[in-house]
Image: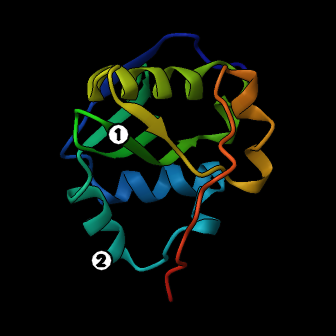
C-alpha cells in the first residue's frame, strides 16, 4: 500500500475508546486484550501516558499506552501499530516519545507479544531474564 510518509505524534490523554479499539484491531493486538468495551475504557482513562501516531488526514495508526511514576519506571503496556503502516519506524518512534514524555531517567519496561520478540532487540532494547507475573483471571 502507498501511504503518505508524514506521521504526527502527540500525547492524547482523552483518546476515544472507539479509536483505541480500532487501532488495536488493525494491529492484531486486540487478540491479546480484553474484548469488554468498559474495561478498555478504564484502561485508557487510568493510563498515565498515551502517545499516538496519526496520518495527515487524522487517522489513528499507532498508540503507546503507559503507566509511569515519571521518576523511576515506566511500564509500556500497549504498543500497537496498524498493520498497513508497520515497518516504517512508527513503533520505534512511539516507544522513544513515550520514554521522553515519561522521563529518560525512568527505566522503560514492556512485555513483548510472542510475535514481536525479535523486533525489540532490533531497535536497541535489552531482554531481562527476571520478569515474574501473576496472570489475571480475565
Q: Is residue 37 above or below residue 92?
A: below
Residue displayed at 74% across by 44% down: 116
Q: Position of residue 54 (x, y in %)?
A: 42, 27
Q: Is any atom of residue 59 visible in this view? A: no
Residue displayed at 50% across by 89% down: 137
Judge from the rendering whether residue 125 lies leftward or rightward of residue 74; answer left or right. Answer: right
Q: Position of residue 40 (x, y in %)?
A: 36, 68
Q: Mark 1 points at which residue?
A: 73
Determine the image quadrant of residue 63.
top left
Q: Position of residue 7 (x, y in %)?
A: 47, 16
Q: Position of residue 86 (x, y in %)?
A: 69, 30
Q: Name the residue under label 2.
A: 38
Helix, strand or loop for disc 2: helix
Judge from the rendering whether residue 27 lies leftward or rightward of residue 62; answer left or right. Answer: right
Q: Is any atom of residue 80 visible in this view? A: yes
User: Which residue of the protein is positioned furthest toward the top in this rendering?
Assistant: 6
Callout 2 environment at 10 Å: few (<14), some (14 to 19), or many (20+)? few
Residue displayed at 66% across by 56% down: 28
Helix, strand or loop for disc 1: strand
Residue displayed at 66% across by 20% down: 124
**Residue closest to the eye, 136 or 130:** 130
Nearer the N terminus, badge 1 or badge 2?
2
Callout 1 environment at 10 Å: few (<14), some (14 to 19), or many (20+)? some
Amino acid at each position: 500500500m502507498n501511504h503518505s510518509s508524514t506521521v504526527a505524534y502527540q500525547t492524547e490523554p482523552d483518546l476515544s475508546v472507539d479509536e483505541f479499539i480500532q487501532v488495536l484491531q488493525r494491529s492484531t493486538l486486540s487478540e491479546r486484550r480484553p474484548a469488554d468495551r468498559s474495561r478498555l475504557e478504564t484502561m485508557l482513562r487510568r493510563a498515565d501516558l498515551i502517545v499516538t501516531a496519526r496520518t495527515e488526514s487524522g487517522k489513528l495508526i499507532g498508540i503507546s499506552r503507559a503507566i509511569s511514576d515519571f521518576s523511576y519506571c515506566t511500564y509500556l503496556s500497549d504498543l500497537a501499530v496498524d498493520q498497513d503502516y508497520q515497518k516504517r519506524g512508527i513503533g520505534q518512534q512511539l516507544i522513544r516519545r513515550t520514554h521522553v514524555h515519561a522521563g529518560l531517567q525512568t527505566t522503560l519496561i514492556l512485555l513483548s507479544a510472542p510475535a514481536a520478540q525479535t523486533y525489540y532487540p532490533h531497535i536497541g532494547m535489552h531482554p531481562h531474564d527476571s520478569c515474574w507475573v501473576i496472570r489475571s483471571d480475565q
